[in-house]
Amino acid sequence: MLNVAVVGLGWWGSHVVKTLDKSRKIRVVRVVEVKPTAASRRLAKEYGAPLTTDYADALKDPNVEGVILTTPHTTHEALLMLAARANKQIFCEKPLSLTSASAKKMVKACRDRGLILGLGHERRYEPAWMRLAEIVRKKELGTIIAVEANNSHDKFTPLKQDNWRGNPKDAPAAGWTGMGVHLTDFMISLFGPIQWVNAASDRRVLKLPSGDVVTAQFQFKDRTLGTINVVSKTPYYARFAVFGSTGWAEIVDTAHPEDWDDTHMTVSISGGKRTSRTYKPRDTVKMNFEAWADAVSGKKEYPFTDVERIGNVAVLEALVKSSKSGKRERVRN
């Protein structure tokens, strides 16, 4: 059992505490919240995890073996570096950071100390996504030519203008840090590094300063072309499609992963029948945390490479730059 402190008790941090209460591999023994609310105090009491407002308390606690960072993106580097110096295992919510230089520094700090750096890209564990990865790796679609995806929802609608999730400093390029980074993480794991990005972002309806729509085109090192669209003010819609020389595969979600519903996958192979399959939801958030815990204990290798960790942040950095410059920007992997 890996004993951890959850740092940050907002919407997602609270969800993490509740999720890990069902785990047999990770136990939350402390929570950290610099601005505790009545709700966060109730949560800490309900789940039996002492609440502190001082991060240093958790790092000094010998019973805390690792930390889970669910804080605003701009705080990730500083919090991770402190945890690494204290030799605590680290799980960081996505995106790892906002610049490739920062991500490289964070990855190196963990690698130099032999720490396992977990990352909050749980969508890799969704059954349909895992099946698609298998199809691509077995070359069942032939030479991959293009990939396109969309991850849109309206869950940001209730957010106030001063919420950090709508702040360009903490969450630039509309909903990219909340949704788009999941898509590029999976794409990079399938097709390798992205070379360039051409992006546009705007604010059409929501009052959030960071905007409510972002679109990006990009090319991978193997010359595969990609397109992603993310809208933050529309009913839930998610699609991921890969097109190859001998077939294509498409995944369409029925509902947001948080709302637990089916996912549908269709595969079409040249000269064959089009096949469809429905996948039931599962707790991918818990699965990702437990995969990290297994890696910490030495049972299994964690399925995220440093190249992927850094590369996805590098794409985010180039995308933000492109959305401001209006030009194609090179990705500094």
Image (cartoon, rainbow, N blue to C red):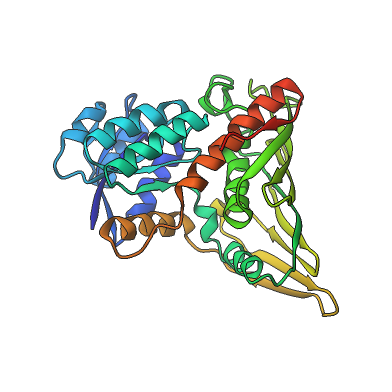
Q: Which of 264 and 128 is in front in this view?
A: 128
Quadrant in which the C terminus is drawn:
top right
Taking the image as shown, residue 279 lies to the left or right of residue 103, namely right
In the foreground, 197 or 213: 197
Quarter of image, res 254: bottom right
Q: From what the image shows, is residue 304 above or below residue 130?
A: above
Q: Residue at image x 74%, y 30%? A: 328
Q: Is residue 299 visible?
A: yes
Residue 126: percent from left, percent from top: 55, 61
Image quarter hosting the N terminus: bottom left
Residue depicted at x 36% and y 58% = 290
Query: Residue lying furthest left in this view?
Result: 62
| Image location (x, y in percent) of residue 329 | 69, 30
- Give percent across and percent down for residue 310: 50, 40
Q: Is residue 90 left or right of residue 184?
A: left
- Which residue is rendered at x = 28% and y = 40% of the image? 44
- Residue 331 vs residue 51: left or right? right
Q: How many marks?
A: 0
Q: Compared with residue 288, is residue 97 higher up or lower down, i.e. above or below?
A: above
Q: How far from the left and from the top, in percent, is residue 119?
A: 44, 46
| Outermost residue, front side | 222
| Residue 173 in view in this figure | no
Picture residue at 76% right of the left edge, 24% below the top: 326
Q: Residue furthest bottom?
A: 272
